Image (tube, rainbow, N blue to C red):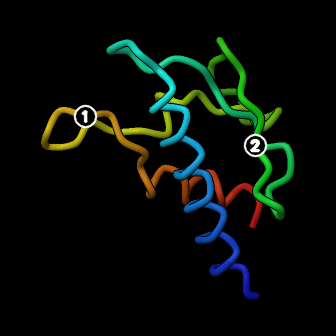
Amino acid sequence: MERQEQATEFARALCRYVAQELRDQDGEYVRGAVKVADARNHLFMPLPHQGTDESVDIYALADLCHVDDDMQTVPDLNRALGVARNYF
């Protein structure tokens, strides 16, 4: 698989993970973060209260989302692709 395909697959997996984390939240504000444990195998770890720190592969959920036209917070594929560029 070429690098671009790997990056796209990683970004989609990250978006699915973020979407699941958003479903598990009950408030109006996005909380938590995700640590990329293994980018090639799409393994992520939840972190309860952490800001983005790219040097240790941690990304705040809020930084991986945008607000859509229906005012819902949803994963942002372009932001996830930006994260993917760090690995592929």
Residue 1, percent from left and from top: 76, 88
Is tag 1's residue or tag 2's residue first in the polypeptide sequence? 2
Residue located 77% across and 43% down the image:
36
From the top left corner, tell me how far across and down residue 69 is, in percent.
13, 43
Residue at the disc numbered 1: 72
Toward the bottom, the furthest residue is 1
Position of the C terminus, as image quadrant, is bottom right
The residue tagged 2 is 44
Q: Amino acid at mark 1?
A: Gln
Q: Quadrant of residue 27?
A: top left
Q: Amino acid at mark 2?
A: Phe
83 or 17: nearer the viewer: 17
In the rendering, at what x and y percent does residue 14 appear? 61, 51
- Gap in angstroms between the C-alphas marked 1 and 2: 23 Å
Task: Return the x and y of residue 26 as percentages of the image width and height.
Answer: 41, 16
- Given residues 84 and 68, the one toward you in this image is 68
Left or right of residue 68: residue 80 = right
Q: Are marks 1 and 2 in contact (CB under 8 Å)?
A: no
Give the crowd class for mark 2: few <14, some 14-19, many >=20 residues within 10 Å: some
Q: Residue at x 26, y 36 (%)?
A: 67
- With 38 as the anchor, is 29 left or right in this view? left
Disc 1, SS? loop
